[in-house]
Image (spheres, rainbow, N blue to C red):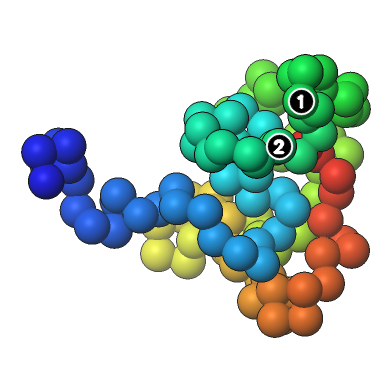
Amino acid sequence: AENMYFFSDLALTLNEPEERVAPTDSRLRPDQLLGWGAEGRTPPRFGRLGGAREKQPLPPASPRPGKDYEGYIPLWFERKVDAVTGELICAYKGGYWEAKDKQDWSACPDIF
């Protein structure tokens, strides 16, 4: 309890490992896996000697805040204008929970 630092139970469990998640889940990032310190576990794309396989570089950060990256199309969200505030938002367009139920991640890019 002394290590909770006034975080809620929800906040403390947000980064807990979970099975059957998309391969693009940030909890599967190699640096996140190394932080777990699980004995005998080899994070994806890392060998026992720590050599990472090269991946395609991510596009540079957008110089225009609120604008999309060129060539990137989100799988489960779309940009919309909020009807109340007029702000540009990311709205869930569906498909994630169906893919998770079927364990069909074929639409996910290989980013890690």
Q: Dot 1, crowdedness within 10 Å: few (<14), some or many (≥20)? A: few
Q: In the rendered structure, find residue 89 and report the number of the disc placed on it.
A: none
Give neighbour class at mark 2: few <14, some 14-19, many 20+ (Cα, 10 Å): some
Residue 42 x/y as whole percent:
71, 37
Q: Residue furthest front?
A: 40
Alpha carbons under labels 2 and 1: distance apart: 7 Å
**Quadrant in which residue 22 is drawn:** bottom right
SS category of the residue bearing label 2: loop
Q: Position of residue 112 (x, y in %)?
A: 77, 37
Q: Is residue 29 visible?
A: no
Residue sitting at 47 percent across and 66 percent down?
83
Q: Nearer the viewer, residue 92 or 19?
A: 19
Q: Which mark is residue 48?
A: 1
Q: Nearer the viewer, residue 96 or 27?
A: 27
Q: Is residue 49 left or right of residue 35?
A: right
Where is residue 16? Give x, y as percent. Answer: 45, 52
Residue 85 is left or right of residue 63, and the answer is left
Amino acid residing under circle 2: Thr
Specify which label sits upstream in the sequence, 2 or 1: 2
Q: Residue 66: give x, y in percent of width and height.
A: 59, 36
**Front position in the image: 92 or 10:** 10
What residue is disc 2 on? 42
Element type at marker 1?
loop
In this rendering, position of residue 112 left or right of residue 86: right
Q: Residue at x 63, y 39 (%)?
A: 40
Does residue 48 sit above or below 40 in this rendering?
A: above
**Amino acid type shown at disc 1:** Arg
Viewer-side residue, 65 vs 104: 104
Pointer 2 and pointer 1: residues touching (CB < 8 Å)? yes
Give above or below for 50 relative to 73. Answer: above
